[in-house]
Amino acid sequence: MGVVIRQSIFTSVISYAGVVIGYINLLYLYPRFLEIEQIGLLRTIQDAAILFVPFAQLGLAQSITRFFPQFNASRQQSSAFITLILVLSFVSFGLFWIIFRLAEPMILNFFQEQAPDLAAYLNLTLWLTFLLLITTLLETYSRSHLRVAFPGLLREVVIRLLQALLVTAYFVNLVDFREFLIANVVIYVFTLLALIGHLIYSGHFQLTVDFSFFQFQKLKALLQFSTLSFIGTSSIIIIGKVDSLMVAGLLGLASNAIYTTAFYMATVIEIPKRAILQTTMPLIAEAFEKNNLDEIKKIYQRVSINQLIIGSLLLIGVWVNLHNIYALVPKGEVFQTGAVVVLLVGIAKLIDMVFGPSSEIIVLSRYYAFNIAVVLVLAVTVIGLNLLLIPRYGLAGAAGGSVAAMFLFNFTKYIFIYFTFGLQPFSRHTVLVLLIAGLTIGLNYALPVAANTILDIVYRSGLITLVFAALIYFSKSSTELNELALRTWKRIFGS
C-alpha cells in the first residue's frame, strides 16, 4: 500500500506540473512564436493521432489491465504476455493502416477546402499514431506493475518541456516549420525509448516467444474483451477529439487553433474529478460486492455535490478572469474570439461533474454493457451535432454541440440508474450551490476592473473565492468540505 500511496502522490504532483507547463506552452509560447495557422496544423496532427490510437490498438490497453493478473505468476509469463500484446498491436496497426489508406481520399477531401496543408503531413500523423499506440500499451503495462510515476512524468512533464524547447528553437531559426513538426513526433520516439529503458531497468520488460502457457480459451477471452473495450474507448476518444478535427475541416486551421486553445483552458475545471473518482471507484466496487445500495447512494450524492462545488468555483474563476487571461496571451485579440467556447465547454464539464460517478456506477454493476452502448450513441450524436451546428454557428456551434451531447449523455445515465437502482445524485444542496454560484457571478460584475492585469486577477480571484467559500461553508452544503476546512484551520491556527 505504501508503494501505491507514494506513486499516487507523485502522479498528482506530476499532473498539476504538467497542466502548468501545458498552459505556458499553449497560452504563451505557441501564440508568441507560431502563426495561428501553424498552431492549428500542429494541434490537428496531434488530435488526429490521438483519435486514431484506439482504432489502431483495438482495445488492447484495456486488456492489459484486465488480464495482467492472470499472467503475473512469473517473470516468464509476464514477458510472454507483453510480447503477445505487442505482436497483436502490430497486427492491429497493420489493419488500421490498410483501412486508413483506403479511406485516405475521403479524408483528404474533407480537409481539402479549409485545411489543405494537412495533406502533406498525413504520413507524419500515422507515425505519431503508431508511437502513441506502443507508448499507451507500455504505460498500461507499467501501471499494472504499479509503476505509474515515471510514465506520468514522461507524458505530462517531459514531453511538454521538450515541446517548449522545440518551439523556442523554431523561433530562433534553428529549425524550419517542417522540421519543427517532424521533431514534435521525434519527441515521442525519445519518450518511448525512455519508457522502455525504465521498464528494462526495473526488471519488467523482456521479450520472449514462448507462448506455451497461453491457452486458446484465454486468447479468445482476451480478444473478445479487447473488441468490447475498443467500442467504448474509441467512442470516448471520438467525443473528446472529433470536434477539433471537424472545426479544422469545416472552418480551417486558424479556427482550430482558437478552438483547441479555448477548449484546453476549460479542461482545468475537470482536473479534480480525476482524483475524486480514483478514490471513489474502489468504494463503489466494494459497496456493489456487498449489495449495499444505501452506501452507493451516499457516495453518489456526496461526489455529485463536491464536484459541483469545486467545478463551479473553477468555472467561475476562469470565466471572470477570461479578459485578463486573453490580455496576457500573445495575439490575445485573435484568440479572444474563442471566449464563448471556454464558457460552453466549461459548462459541459460542469454538467458531467454534477451528475456524479454515474458511469462508474454503471460500469461496476452487472449492467456495464449499457455504458458502452450509451457512449457509442453519444459519439454518433456528437458527430451529427457538429455537422449541423459548426457550419451555422462556427466555434460556438462546436462547443454548443458538446454541451448538448454531454447533457444527453448524463441524463440518459441518470434515468437508467434511477429506474434500475432507485438512486439519484441530487438534493436541495444542489439547488443551493447553484444559487450561490449565481450570486458569486453577480458579485463579479459589481467589482471594478483594476488598471494592472495581474493585480486584477489576484484581487478578483481572491475576493470571489472568499465569498464563494464562505457561502458554501455556512450553508453546510458539503459535510466533507466543511470538515476539511475545519481541519485546515486548526492545523494553521491551532484552534
Image (spheres, rainbow, N blue to C red):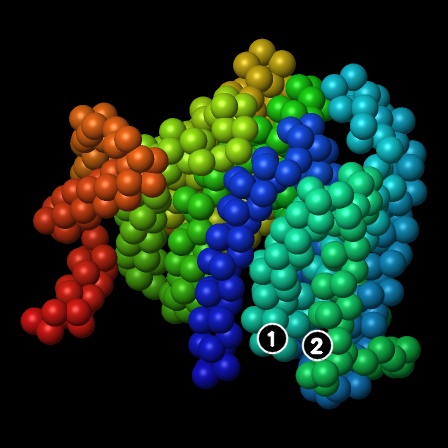
Q: Position of residue 196 (x, y in %)?
A: 76, 72
Q: Position of residue 104 (x, y in %)?
A: 88, 32
Q: Left or right: where does residue 254 sit relative to residue 331?
A: right
Q: Position of residue 453 (x, y in %)?
A: 34, 35
Residue most extreme to the bottom: 74
Which residue is disc 2 drawn over?
198
Q: Amino acid at mark 2?
A: His
Q: Is residue 80 above or below residue 131?
A: below
Q: Amino acid at mark 1?
A: Arg
Crowdedness of circle 1 by 10 Å Cα count: few (<14), some, many (20+)? many
Considering only order in the chain, which callout, 2 or 1, is on the residue closer to the N terminus? 1
- Asked if residue 57 can be seen in this view, the reply is no
Residue found at x 66% / y 35%: 34
Residue most extreme to the top: 392
Q: Which mark is residue 147?
A: 1
Residue found at x 66% / y 47%: 168
Quarter of the image where one finds residue 323: top left
Q: Secondary structure at mark 1?
A: loop
Q: Secondary structure at mark 2?
A: helix
